[in-house]
Image (cartoon, grey):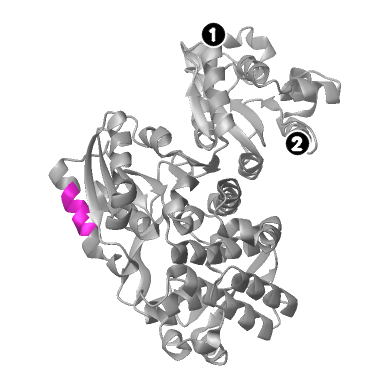
Amino acid sequence: MARALIVNGFMATGKSTVGRLVSELAGLPFVDLDARIAQTAGASIPQIFQSRGEQAFRALERAELERVLDHSGSAPPVVALGGGALLDREARLRALDSAVVVCLTASPAEIVRRAEPLSSRPLLDVRDPRSRVAELLEARHLSYCEGHARLATDGVAPAELARRILDLWQRDPVCVAAGERSYNIEIGAELLSSRLPELVRGASSALLVTDANVARLHGARAETALSAAGSRTVTVVLEPGEEHKHIGSVERIWKAAQAAGLDRTSTIVALGGGVVSDVAGFAAASFMRGIRWAVLPTTLLSMVDASVGGKTGVDLGPAKNAVGAFWQPSGVVCDVALLRTEPVRGFSSAFSEVVKTALIGDPELFGLLETRATEIRSRDPTLLADIVRRCVRVKARIVSFDERESGLRATLNLGHTVGHALEAQGGYSRLTHGEAISLGLVAALRIGERMGKTPAALARRATALLESLGLPVELEKEPLAGAAALIGHDKKRAGKQLKFAFAREIGRVDLENLELDALRERILSLQ
């Protein structure tokens, strides 16, 4: 296990008991955070509450958790938290990024029974403890939803809970925190058959959406895995390619779902690249006003970008992704073994999104791409899993802070303004999405350099990296006039301005509103 395990939840849900059992099974250290706080403060938790108040206790709790999670150079611990330790959302998101977080739950009656004597529980030492528990659980509901798993403990043996948690910890999923819609992304090799049934567990029926290329390679195995889950499954096979990312494809899915009798307990499963996930996700967001969907991406581009974050939609003529919805999936499984069958052009072009992600939030990934190009091109599964995981963690972190692109999430559009315009200008067939984004990144770097926002050395270094990965970088050969005419279709436009992303340094991207006409002139000057 690379990251720590946090056992979270309300008081008396068994966090310390189960946490110790997990640590014994894993052979790794156990930390009871309340005990650590009491030791550091030289006072019991009730004494700290009484003498300093809850606010001071929470400050002590946050500081101690930061120290425990900073386990660099030592084994990752199992940490049992007090019930309010992750109520602050910023602290919770930091914990989700640096640890696997499991929340234990129990009914109010069971909590009160386990919590005796209540005199040792400052928050429950009241006239009606059961009502107080229900009140606190309601107030903390969303914070307890944001984690890698929620496990009910009523009537379940602690040893069984420990085994389930250890299994999750070993898989090391990445969590997108979205309140009640929070979900995990699992990354590894040979996951399709074992993890796909979990994506539809409990669904009354499933509708598998794929395209003709993927269906030929992986469709039968996916249908077998879905059958193993006991769900009645119907398959829709779309035509491959961005040119088929339109409302007609969505309508095919709607009609198949209706004919198959899908209801609000059904699940749509997207098996394919970014086009499949965008179209299937939009169909799920709109059918019966929203049903569950899950993603099993089969291309590198969809693993590092399209499958994470809940952006769904279709193109409207030259307007890329102009119609769609934010609709988070219930789960994502990135099986890097599937990348063995991806055509060379698609696989190589996906690295523009990887470079973009490194520029936004992972300097170590940028260095890895520079030094291990040969292994990357040979599709080493261990290295690919690391690259996908790094990209997913950056995107999950950003989406968790800004689900609906009101601010921070717009940094993910670095290189996309010009890239999408070039892609649309070529009829979505001359360039792959990744090739267009590579050219868009070069354009953003050069515009940023000329405006004094991007260091020249960074622009040269990033362009050289794109070229070393086999991606196009020669803007002079591109129809920039035609692309510049299309930037008004960009979704980030507000009136006559457009929010543009600039790379300041590796790991820092800033946003600035630019006048459309001025931006068009800057694009044309790159010719």
**Residue 255 is covered by the magenta coloring:** yes
Q: Which residue is mark 1?
A: 113
**Quadrant of residue 67 within the rendered picture:** top right
| Relative to 158, 84 lies left or right | right
The quadrant of the rendering that contains the C terminus is: bottom right
Q: Secondary structure at mark 2?
A: helix
In the depicted structure, whether residue 367 falls above or below residue 474: above
Write down the region rendered in magenta.
250-256
Q: Which mark is residue 215?
A: none
| Relative to 144, 297 lies left or right | left
**Residue 90 is covered by the magenta coloring:** no
Residue 437: where, in percent of width, then height?
50, 71
Q: Which residue is mark 2?
A: 59
Q: Residue furthest left?
A: 259
In the depicted structure, whether residue 340 falls above or below residue 201: below
Of 65 and 527, the residue lying toward us: 527
